[in-house]
Image (cartoon, rainbow, N blue to C red):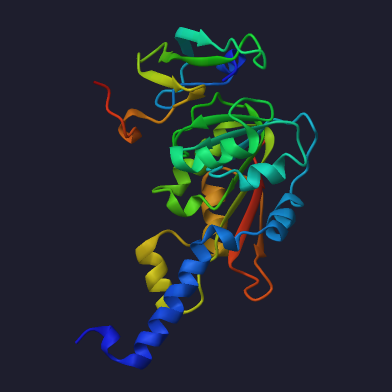
Amino acid sequence: MKESLLEILRCPLDKHELELEDAEYADDENANEDEVVSGTLVCTECGERYPIEDGIPNLLPPDMREETPA
Amino acid sequence: MGILENKARARLFYKYLSKVYDQVNPFIWNEEMRADALELLEFEDDMTVLDVGCGTGFATEGLLEHVDEVYGLDQSRHQLEQAYEKFGKRAPPVHFHRGDAERLPFATDTFDVVWSSGSIEYWPNPILALREFRRVLKPGGQVLVVGPNYPDSFLAQRLADSIMLFYDEYEADAMFKRAGFEDVKHAFMGPSYDPDVAITTVGRAPE
């Protein structure tokens, strides 16, 4: 995902802004510099964490995620 | 004595069962119907468009004939894999997200168009999802939802009700108005042999 997407992404639960943590950026030649391949989106209000999986933000609410965090 | 022990009734049962399955089968939603639905919206190249339940990207592909970029959201990893093959994982042209239609992960007043085809029948609470659509639409933004039309026959209705959501024009009207949309209109679409299998509803978020 593009880092600039943060402007419109919100926590699906309380609609507050998300912060990007532990971001890793794509370094291949096709990538723009703001292409995030992994990291975590963290809600600034409730603290819920949403993973970025192979560049795709997984913003499913926790009750709909098939993988439960260890 | 089950219902299927009478062969005539069994044939009738399977006839209507297959009719219901046809209606929920994504292949019934074809390119011609997609083009008809796209005609109902007003586009500009740089509009921000959200495709809710984008799945394998069939509608996304049509939307990209009208706008430069599309924001796609789906809950299914497997459906999305097929969309990645068509468009690549990175934007442009498609910004992909996994998420829930009833709890959209987007800011209020973000999109010019929210589109959803072949997805509403799976939402547990369509009003919630439609309210979310209205929330993320800019004032005056356009919504378009394609869903399965409620079947005419009683038996198909019973099957439809037990499998998933189906609705008719009146119910669609009530749902969209309850969700706060204005200028709500409906169109029926389908292949020539079954011209009203899909109901398409368009509306606008209040200015």
Q: Residue at x 61, y 25 (%)?
A: B90
Q: Residue at x 37, y 92 (%)?
A: B8
Residue B75 seen: no
For the residue pair B39 and B131, the one nearer the viewer reads as B39
Q: Position of residue B119 (x, y in %)?
A: 51, 50
Q: Residue at x 49, y 9 (%)?
A: A24
Q: Quadrant of residue B69?
A: top right
Q: Is residue B118 above or below residue B197?
A: above
Q: Is residue B118 above or below residue B105?
A: below
Q: Quadrant of the N terminus of chain A?
A: top right
Q: Position of residue B138 (x, y in %)?
A: 66, 30
Seen as rendered, the residue at the extreme left is B1
Q: Position of residue B102 (x, y in %)?
A: 45, 39
Seen as rendered, the residue at the extreme front is A29
Task: Please tell me how many numbered marks the rendered image carries.
Answer: 0
Q: Is residue A67 above or below residue B4?
A: above
Residue B200 seen: yes
Q: Quadrant of the C terminus of chain A?
A: top left
Q: Quadrant of residue B57?
A: top right
Q: Position of residue A53 (x, y in %)?
A: 45, 23
For the residue pair A12 and A30, the one nearer the viewer reads as A30
Q: As drawn, is B9 to the left or to the right of A17?
A: left
For the residue pair B36 and B57, the one nearer the viewer reads as B57
